[in-house]
Amino acid sequence: MGQASSPVLILLAFGFFFATYNLLTMKMHNRSIGKWVYDDSDGEAFFDPVIEMPEEVKKPKNARMPFHVALTATDAPYSKWQCRIMYYWYKKNRDLSGSEMGGFTRILHSGKPDNLMDEMPTVVVDPLPAGLDRGYIVLNRPWAFVQWLEKTTIEEEYILMAEPDHILVNPLPNLARGGLPAAFPFFYIEPAKFENIVRKYYPEEKGPVTNIDPIGNSPVIIKKELLEKIAPTWMNVSLKMKNDRETDKAFGWVLEMYAYAVAAALNDVQHVLRKDFMLQPPWDLSTRKFFIIHYTYGCDYNLKGQLTYGKIGEWRFDKRSFLRGPPPKNLPLPPPGVPESVVRFEQYCNIFALYSPLLGFGKYTLQNNIGY
């Protein structure tokens, strides 16, 4: 074959550039702001392109950046037993290699002390005025953070917003980078899908709704100064959303999560999205490479170890089965074939009960911890 002429090579190069440009443009369709996402499959961060990654985020972190662990809670038995398990595993992981966890606070928004005050560091704050939450208890969460930030001196520069149904399964480092907070992306938080509703709170002059991250307030690791800016907006947006019938119906039990995402965007705060921040059994099968178990979903299996989600299984664990008190001692381990994430969660509950036989958790036999 003869050599291609220079004009032909130039045309080919231009054509390749044009095709590449079009491909990138298609991928960026309906986006005006990129999202940094950490993909646990290969341990790398990839960019949802448009904006360039800030230089300070690119640099490897070389200084320890401790963060304060804060979770909001009520004085209900359902909240108490979850807080106790969460605090136990926080203490077990706090001082391990790789952890950057600092202090801990349970923000109790019942307005009065309870019987866990001596067991874990607790700050009591007021609930919303009677009737304002309209039966939606988590509406107290942003108001609780507003009060806590105003009345408490927090030594750490960063804060982890956690929840009672979180269990730390691996030492947690500070995942925030270059001033950008870190958050877990939830598949069911879809601002673009509800653009007509979101626009009631996020006006067009602020930009496209893709500026709003697909997150809730937890888990999030964020600079204290940023949370101090976001929290009052988060509280006000939450109340406005709850008082709007269309918004309340569309967002349901995740309304407060949407409110945080919108409030952050209103304050021009973007999050690095970390898929490895948290796993959610039974959908996530392994705890490897993850930091937190979130046991919000019920786990139902038959005795062959097959998931029967939507149907009560022969073996099951659902936190909602224990609204009036903690799970009983001697929780049976799942049958063979059940994913490691579910087995490990059950073991963590059993180990906690073994060493913390107070308030309903009794001592029991070591054979319940086989394989741990």
Image: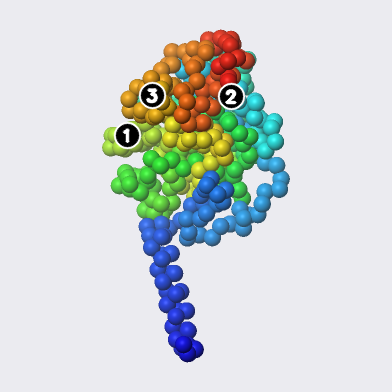
How far apart are labels 1 and 3 at the CA level?
A: 36 Å
Give the residue displayed 46% in from the left and 43% down from the top.
185
Q: From this viewpoint, is residue 110 visible? A: no
User: Which numbered mark, 1 or 2, is in the foreground of this view?
Assistant: 2
* Disc 1, SS: helix
How far apart are labels 2 and 3 at the CA level?
A: 21 Å
Image quadrant of residue 315?
top left
On screen, 152 above or below 355?
below
Provide the residue designation for mark 1. 248
* Front one among 2 and 252: 2
Q: Position of residue 151 (x, y in %)?
A: 59, 28
Quarter the C terminus occupies: top right
* Three-letter amino acid code at the position of disc 3: Asn
Does label 1 or label 3 sit earlier along the sequence?
Answer: 1
Provide the residue designation for mark 3. 302
On screen, 328 above or below 146?
above
